[in-house]
Amino acid sequence: MWFDGSVLVRVLGPLRVEVDSRAERVAEVDGGVEVSWIPAGGGSSSDVFDACIVCCPLPVALEICPGQRDLLGPIDRALGYTQCVTVAVGTTRTPDSPAFLVQMPSREDHDVALMFLDHNKAADRAPAGHGLIGCCWEASAAARMMEEPD
């Protein structure tokens, strides 16, 4: 079963969640989808489910979903991935701006592309009276900085 975005998925009953586990294989089988994974404690596990939503980078999906290689392979070859550097800056007072996003003109800074004023997105993003700004670097600047120390 391979679902596209037009399918409404309902979760009925309890949902089992495992953290710190690594998916190894997702494959269609009679009656559902078999998912194989390595649990946090090691070893291996496998189970069949009614459906599976794969949320990971495309190259990983290509590796763990062998039955979808004809679909995913051309997409993987056509899309280039960018690298991203984001720095969170906490402020001691709330910045005087109602914006939640500020695009940085390249004449002001060639490396910083935009800033999210996270404290304006939702009240719980920063302590009361403080600000939280996420500075996102432009893709080529991020690629240059990727191997640099923090």
Image: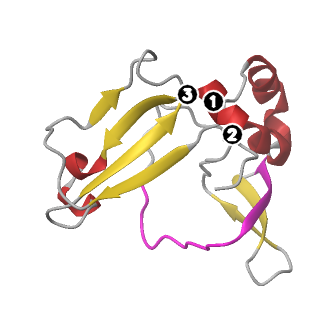
What residue does disc 1 label? 141
Residue at image location 15% in from the left, 38% down from the top = 97
Expressed as whole percent of the image width and height from the top left, the position of residue 28 reads: 76, 47
What residue does disc 3 label? 138
Instruction: In this rendered view, identify the residue nearer to me: 121 or 12.
Output: 121
Instruction: Identify whether 102 is placed above or below 125.
Output: above
Q: Amino acid at mark 3?
A: Glu
Instruction: In this rendered view, identify the residue nearer to me: 91 or 56.
Output: 91
Q: From mark 1 to mark 3, how far is it between C-alphas? A: 5 Å
Element at label 3: loop
The crowd level at tag 3 (other Cα within 10 Å; few <14, some 14-19, many 20+) is many
Q: Amino acid at mark 2?
A: Met
Range covered by the magenta-colored residues = 10-28
What residue does disc 2 label? 145
In front: label 2 or label 3: 2
* Relative side of 38 to 93, left or right: right
Dot 1 and dot 3 residues touching (CB under 8 Å): yes
Quadrant where the image shows the N terminus: top right
The crowd level at tag 1 (other Cα within 10 Å; few <14, some 14-19, many 20+) is some
Q: Amino acid at mark 1?
A: Ala
Dot 2 and dot 1 residues touching (CB under 8 Å): yes
